[in-house]
Image (tube, rainbow, N blue to C red):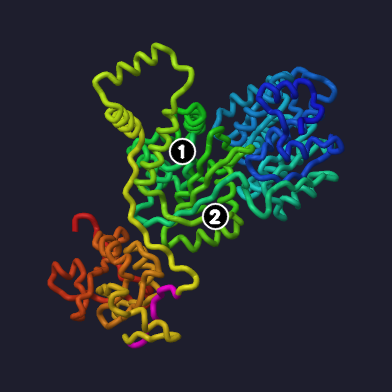
Amino acid sequence: MPFPDLPGSLARALQERGYDDPTPVQEAVLQPELEGRDLLVSAQTGSGKTVAYGLALGSTLLGEADRLERPGLPRALVVAPTRELALQVQRELEWLYGSSGGRVIACVGGMDQRREQRALAQGAHIVVGTPGRLRDHIERSHLDLSDLKAVVLDEADEMLDLGFRDDLEAILDTTPPERRTLLFSATLPKDILSLARSYQHDAERIALAARDRPHGDIQFRAMTIAPHEADAALVNVLRHYDSGTAMVFCATREAVRRLHGHLLEKGFAVVALSGELGQAERNRALQSLRDGRARVCVATDVAARGIDLPDLGLVIHADLPTNEQAFLHRSGRTGRAGKKGVCVVLASFSRRRKAERMLSAARAEIAWGPPPSAAEILKGDLERLIRETEPESDVSEEERADARALLAGRSAEDLALALLRLHRARLPAPEDLTVLSERPSRDKPARSFDDHDGGRPRRDRGERAERGEEGDVVRYSLNVGRRHNADPKWLVPFLCRRGHVTRHDIGRIEIFDRHSVVGIAAAVAERFAHATAKPDPNGENIVIRRDTGEGGAPPSRGDEARGRPDRKPPSKHRKGPPRRSKRRDGE
């Protein structure tokens, strides 16, 4: 369906940008019966919302005219939750209203406020900004909204989540009561509906957000990784998917800094994006992604909304998001405006259950599997190289002569080998990952720890006796026992973390006075032994060794040096593994 009747200047702008048919949200807001009405719209990210409300404002701003009058007091105000989204909206509205003579100004935190003040004094048709900065300009009398015809609240749910309700109400209270109000939100919780009732009049509700399956243009994948191989798995995922641009989400600024440095070292063209960067640095990072100088962006959730990169085909959750809404907003950076995208969730053994709950709450249809291996990546490189070297029909004689010169004195195999090496030399090397054991299926009894009483393990429901059979498990001894408050409640997660195994790989745990013995599934015993041989980064002075069957506890590292078989038990009030005593520098 083509776009309905629009002012000539807007129609020309769409044609120049290659817009032939409207997206569902654009079609919905442009219905003739909705002209001039307040709108309450729920639509997922990447659905073309900015152009939708830009077009919906056309009749309000232009009327029957083809061009706007000379800029003066703002006629429309767009409020967005983040600087990135506000600046992106400004760019979109600038090209959309460029043929109309529209002047669009952005007022966002982190930018020069005096420059914004001068721009407002020169007049504008549309002002786009973040709540805090807009309110500041209003209170300083730099922004006069008395002639306003329309207000747009973009990503309203995010603004309320970020605590901007007071700012929004203060801004809306200064606008004329007869203004038009367009409220766009990915979701419509109670707070949004309450805000709509307070500041909208007879609003038409348009619900286009997918409820059963979010982001239908995104292919979701989840990968179980060993905790010590998280960075290596990330490298392989980036190498495996042939994406123009990729975005990697982390939970903290520190994680962004670390991963940014790691990927730079590996040879990726990567930039970082987090709240600690100034606006100029963030703009440079985004511009390098848009013009192709960078291919990977490592970011915190500051980039989960409002960033639209044209070739962003891959989103990776290196750290799990806080909830399903954050997951959907992160994932929504790809698969936008009808384009396909891939979203990958990386989850260690101990985080898989949390990831499954979050993905289930988000109603994401997702397949679990291991991260791509180095062999799979190299195979994919070869397949892409074969596709890229398909002969073309329009080959000049000079090119054929150069090709014959390359073949002179070389076999075709030697030339192909040189080409393959040149191709691989430009790419970061894939990582060799541990082959992980498959998670037990639901129809098989999963391994779990036994409860204990008096140092003698109990058997439960008849099947636990089978788990201790020799050959199925490898037994390991730990130098903690009842005297050290040893308990399966903290031993199991401790063993999972230290040994890079899952709770399903842990069999019977026997707790004695000074030591404990645990059975580890034979399939992962080698990985468990390799991981536990390394120093514990958390500083817990627990030694894990292969159990010889002779009894007794392995000495702790400190006790080995002092010749003592064990150490003083921790406080009886403390529940958890004994900790290494802290020493001041120089002791």
For the residues labelled 1 and 2, say whether their Cβ atoms are less than 8 Å apart: no
Q: Is residue 110 above or below residue 65?
A: below
The residue at the far top in this view is 398
Q: Name the spot of residue 180 as percent of width and height, x first.
A: 80, 37
SS assignment at label 2: strand
Which numbered disc flags the more N-terminal residue, 1 or 2?
Answer: 1
User: Label 1 to label 2, Cα distance in Å?
Assistant: 20 Å
Total count of labels: 2
Looking at the magenta stretch, what is its main secondary structure? loop
Determine the secondary structure under disc 1: loop
The span picked out in magenta is: 445-454
Q: Nearer the viewer, residue 547 or 59?
A: 547
Q: Residue at x 63, y 25 (%)?
A: 117
State the residue in front, 434 or 500.
Answer: 434
Instruction: Tell me the number on the disc at residue 242.
Output: 1
Q: Quadrant of residue 24?
A: top right
Q: Which mark is residue 88?
A: none
Asked if the stretch drawn in magenta spans residue 450, the answer is yes
- Dot 2 alpha-carbon crowd within 10 angstroms: few under 14, some 14 to 19, many 20 or more: some
